[in-house]
Amino acid sequence: MLKIEGLNVYSDNKKILENINLEFEYGKLYLIFGPNGSGKTTLAKAILNDESLKKEGKIFLDNVDITNERTENIAKYTYYSFQDPVEIENIRTRTLLMYILDNFDEKKILSLGKDLGLPEDFLDRGVNYNLSGGEKKRFSLLLSILLNRKVIILDEIDSGVDIEFLNKLKYYLYQFKKENKIVILISHNFKFVKELDIDKVIVLIDGKVKYVGDKNILNKIEEYGFKVF
Amino acid sequence: MDSKFFKDLFKKYYEKIFDNYKIIEKEFNINKNQYIEINLDKNIYYNVFNIDNSEVKIRINNNDTSMIYNEFNIIGKVKINILINNSGNLRIYNLYKVNSNSSSDSIEKIYNKNNVVLISKIFIDKNSENSEGKLSQYLFEENGISILLPILDIENNKSKGFHGSKILKLTEKEENYLRYLSLNKEEIKNILMREFNFI
C-alpha cells in the first residue's frame, strides 16, 4: 500500500499542497482530478521526492518510509510519466533502455513500439527527440509497460492523443490492475475517464483533497463544475 | 608551415615552458586503412600525414603539458577519426589540406578532463577544384576547460567546407528526467560516455 500522511508541500516557499492524507491499494485504479493548478502534478512529484519541493508529513510504501528517499531510488519501484516528456538528443533511446531495463529484448521492444504507433527508428533516436507530442505519450506508455514498476503514475498521458491510442491506454490500464499494481491516473479528459473502471476518484482543489470516492462524482462535476465542492 | 614556424607561432601565445621542449617530427604516408596511437609527453610534436584514399584512426593520449601539430594532406576520398584523450594541458593544431577532386570526412572526439585548446582548420587552396572538407567535433568534458576553434578556409569557389560541433552534456531538466527513470549521477555519466564512444 502507498500511504500519504499529513503531507504539506511547498515550492519556492509557496504552499502547494495542504494536509494530504491518502491511501492507494494494489490492484486498483485511482483517478486524480481537479482544475489546473490544483496540485495534481505536485502530488505525484512529491511521492517521488522531487528535489525542487519541500515537504512535511510522511509517505510510506509497504510500510517503509520513503519520504526522504532519493528520487532515483523511489523510481526503482515507481514509474511517473511526465506531462511533457523531456527531449534528450545526446542519449539514444536504445542506450537508455539498455540501462534501465532488467532485460533488453530488442525484438519485443520494437514489436511493442510498433503496436503503440512509435516510429520504426525510435530506438536509434535521442530519447523523445523529434517525437510529436502524441508520440512522446506513446513512448511514456511503452516505458510504463517495460519498466514493470509496482506503482504507476500517469500524468495526463491521455491528452493530445488519438482515439486509437486511448483504446490501447485503456487496455493497459486494465492490464496493470490485473498485474496487481497501484495505478494512478491524472487526467482532465471527462469522456475518457468516464469509460474506465476507476476504483476511486480523488478530487484536488487549491492543494486540498476535497473528495475521495466513487466515479459518480464525475457526472456532477461535468454538470456543475468544481463549484459542487 | 614548417616545424620551426609552428613552434614560434605557438610560443607567442602559450607558456614559456615550450622553449625547453624538443621538436619531434614524423611523416606518415598512408594508402591503406590504419590505426595510429600517439602518446604525448613533454615535447612538441610535428606530424605530417599524407593520406591517399584511406581511412585513418588516430588516438592521442596526453597527461602532460604538450603541444602537437598535425598536418593532413588529403588525396582522394579520405576519412579521419581522431580521439583525443586528455587529462593534462594540451595545445593541438590540426590542419586538413584537401587537394583537387578530393574529399575528407574528419571526426574529432575530445574527451577532456583538464585543459585543451584545439584549433582545427580545413584548408582548400584556390587551385583545388571540386573538393570537399567536412569536420565534426564532439566534446565530452569532465571538470575540464576546452577551447575549440574550428576554421574553414576555402579559397576555391567550386569546393566546399562544412563544420559541426556538439557537446555531450545534459541540462538539469534532462538529468532530472533520467532520475525519474531510476538513474543516478554516476549511471548518467556512464551512459553519456557510452554515447561518446559510439560516435
Image (tube, coloured by chain):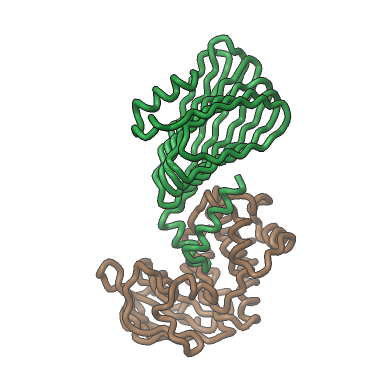
Chain colours: A brown, B green
The percent position of residue B146, horizontal first and vertical second, equals 41, 41
Residue at screen point 41% across, 48% down:
B144
In this rendered view, identify the residue nearer to me: B115 or A172: B115
The number of numbered discs placed on residues in the rendered structure image is 0
**In the rendered image, the vertical position of residue A117 relative to residue A210, given as above or below:** above
Residue at screen point 52% across, 39% down:
B40
In this rendered view, identify the residue nearer to me: A127 or A142: A127
The furthest residue to the top? B127
Q: Left or right? Give the position of A168 relative to A25.
A: right
In this rendered view, identify the residue nearer to me: B107 or A54: B107
The percent position of residue B13, horizontal first and vertical second, equals 34, 29
The percent position of residue B184, horizontal first and vertical second, equals 49, 66
On-image quarter of the C terminus of chain B: top right
In this rendered view, identify the residue nearer to me: A203 or B120: B120
Could you tell me if residue A212 is visible in this image?
no
The furthest residue to the bottom? A63
**In the rendered image, the vertical position of residue B178 relative to residue B24, given as above or below:** below
Could you tell me if residue A173 is visible in this image?
yes
Q: Left or right? Give the position of A71 relative to A191.
A: left
The percent position of residue A132, horizontal first and vertical second, equals 55, 51
Q: Quadrant of residue A28?
A: bottom right
Residue at screen point 36% across, 72% down:
A39
Residue at screen point 56% across, 59% down:
A161
**In the rendered image, the vertical position of residue A119 relative to residue B73, given as above or below:** below
Q: Left or right? Give the position of A189 relative to A55.
A: right
